[in-house]
Image (spheres, helix red, strand yellow):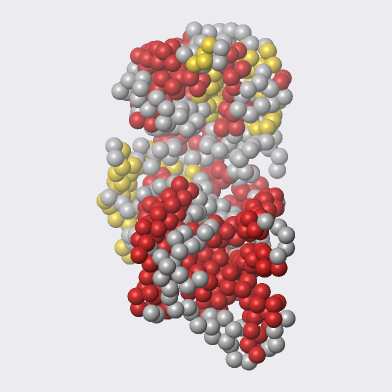
Amino acid sequence: MELIQAIIASIIVAATPLAFAAIGEVVAEKSGVLNLGVEGMMIVGALAGFATTFETGSPALGVLVAAAAGTTAALAFGFLTQILLANQVATGLALTLFCLGLTALAGHAYSGQATPPLQPIPIPLLSEIPVLGPALFAHDALVYLAVALALAAGWFLRSTRAGLILRAIGENPDAAHAIGYPVVLARLMALAFGGALAGIGGAYLFLVQTPHWVENMTSGRGWIALAIVVFAGWRPERALLGAYLFGGVSVIQLHMQAFGIDIDAQYLSMAPYLATIVVLALISHDKTRQRMNAPAALGRPFFQSS
Amino acid sequence: MTPPRFEAANLTKRFPGVLANDAVSLHVEAGEIHALLGENGAGKSTMVKMIYGLMRPDGGEMRLDGQPYSPAKPAEARAMGVGMVFQHFSLFDALTVAENIALGISGMRPTRALSQKIIDVSNSYGLALDPDRHVQSLSAGERQRVEIVRCLLQNPRMLIMDEPTSVLTPQEAETLFETLRRLAADGCSILYISHKLDEIRALCSRATVLRHGRLVGAADPRQTSARELAEMMIGGAWNAAGAKAMTPGRARLEVQNLSLASEDPFGVALKEIGFTVHAGEILGIAGIAGNGQTELLDALSGERRTAPGCIRLNGAAIGDLGPTRRRRLGLCAVPEERLGHGAAPELSLGHNVLLSARTRQGLERRGFLSLTRARAFADDVAKRFDVRSSGVHAEARTLSGGNLQKFIVGREIAQNPDVLCVLQPTWGVDAAAAAAIHTAILTLAADGAAVLVISQDLGELLAISSRFSVIADGRVSEPRAVGDVTVEEIGLLMGGQAGPSEAIAV
């Protein structure tokens, strides 16, 4: 029982950074922009948040600065792709590579340092349910925030007018422009939201998972988040589920190593990435489903005429 | 006296190098269906874009019900009661009808109340629509209904319809006319843009005619003959003297029973097309854009294949051959789109000749390209057709529209084809370049080639063709000698009433 409780709790911890990044990217991609720089925005958020928390001792301030740093990186991407009309794929890759390099350089002074972790906030009553209570309802504030954001983003896209406009822009920016909607502005706002969430996802790594700054500490989570977006069919709630699923795979492999199951550790470490590839291949198989959900203008540049 | 519903005075819009609207004035009364008439490029679209707030005029003023009216953006125009239904719908495929309509109305959310309103409005004007369906499953006519209902929900004082029937079937068009008449009877003004003369004569009580950005005049289309309207549109350049006496040579290009579905969801299927072009002859095919011209050229050039016997070149069945083999046999084609289809924008002229002249000009030896020969051929084309550029190394996109068009048409003519098929040879080209292209085409025909020219420019076709037919809704009318055909007939044919022998399915 104790073990199951610990496994569930650790799945949630492992999944939360993925959830933040994936929910943010769902919203950004719904506007028709493919930002492959999620990994980069996460690592920038992680370092900025770590430095702030380390200097001030305040995890809350660290989260805010991490969000701001992610937003800055996202807006740099937005400036290049939406205003200068640079290729989105190439720019996203460049953003990731640039951010990884930049944080390795700027974070040098912080390596080996530690910060105070984020304290859990058990929810009264719910957290007292046997087994499930401590596993599900005794987490830090960011775990709850991720769940709330998934629901809120889903509601926003489905039921609000602004969400409808965002979807319309991702579907057919020319038509949206003809009706009179500000395509570029809306896309920049969606990108900024995605960047902020990726930044918070990055901050979660040192706030809860490992209280140190480690170079390249995102280790591919941004890429998994991008896969989750496709897996989730561009729906925020499903992105949360996807994050838990992928988080589960990565936690189970740790526990399998702990149990001493006789598989080389390298194979187990591959598990989350292999799972990503398998799931994407399976999902891409059904082309009509993909076309229904994917924003039709995803990744295409928008040239504003007249 | 009440002021007119809408009034524009001396509206002017300048683009670099072009005066798109030169002091155009117009007024529309309440409940009037007013036609804005003109050929392509006459300035109709520019004018309505200014009225709908998509462009700001450089001069002149507009009034709506006597009040000054100058919308900075479409939302303002809509708020003041001016709605517009575009020729190319601004709809979102993956969203539902209700969501699409909500997007076009400020502050509206796709609620159940909206769905009910949609059903109410669509029923009262005979525009059946299901608010919960996704737009991608709708036909062109249904999509247009979405746009119209979207406008109607905002209680418009004036509705602008931009070539509304260009994507409709005849039945859908008839339903649309009923709706528009009912709307007008309810007091809504309609500004109806078209160049289909029969439609305008059936629907509109007044017409304003534009030509080359200038106001030519106003007329009552019910009192004015199609010929007079056409003359106003074309600019009096109408004369049958363009007809050339000719002795038909052997049949070079024979098209029989050519039917082909379009690959483009907005495209037009070709329906049982048949005609013959003889040596020394230029056959002109007129028609309004989007009636199957692109599809017909694709079928002739070999980009779309058909059954072998549908298309014969010098008697040999070529319907199932691709463009390269057709070229080798002597059929060259010039597509409509200069950049991206006729020429690769980023490639030099020297490389661009390789695209279509590779086989006929021997620019390729055992799989290797001869760039020297390609450059020499490009240089030859440029000299012969007076293409002004910085040389054969210039990228295609750096040429002006007229020069690039001369180059592309010249590239095909210089290959001495037996048959040349051209779509819109002088689209967006200045008069001097157009004259040069016309001369080149006439010379090619005089040398014994068969030429097919598909164009929306009536004046052009009447000037250079020896025979003439009209494409409408994917059907090509029986070719007639240019001297025998009257403008009334052309107008009727362009409206889709293909000759007395072919009844339209209703």
Q: Nearest the camera: B24 or B266?
A: B266
Residue lying furthest bottom in this view? A125
Q: Residue at x 32, y 57 (%)?
A: B62
**Residue B495 location in percent, x, y?**
57, 38
Looking at the image, which is closer to me, B432 or B175? B432
Q: Is residue B263 above or below residue B438?
A: below
Instruction: Tell me the quarter of the image containing the N terminus of chain A.
Output: bottom right
In percent of width and height, residue B73 lies at 38, 59
Total number of numbered labels? 0
Give left or right: position of B113 versus A212: right
User: Looking at the image, is A170 positioned above or below residue B163?
Assistant: below
| Residue B392 placement: quadrant | top left
Pick whichever, B102 or A186, lies toward us.
A186
Residue at figure coordinates x 56%, y 35% from the top left: B494
Q: Is residue B319 above or below residue B213?
A: above
Q: Is residue B243 left or right of residue B270?
A: left
- Residue B120 is drawn in which quadrant? bottom right
Residue B153's spot in the image, x, y percent? 53, 66
Looking at the image, is A93 positioned above or below residue A164? above
Taking the spot 63% from the left edge, 34% from the top edge, the residue there is B474
Residue furthest left as drawn = B59
The residue at the point 58 percent across, 75 percent down is A147
Q: Position of residue B287 (x, y in %)?
A: 54, 33
In the foreground, B74 or B210: B74
Whether residue B367 is visible here, answered yes or no, is: yes
Is residue A156 visible from the viewing direction of this image? no
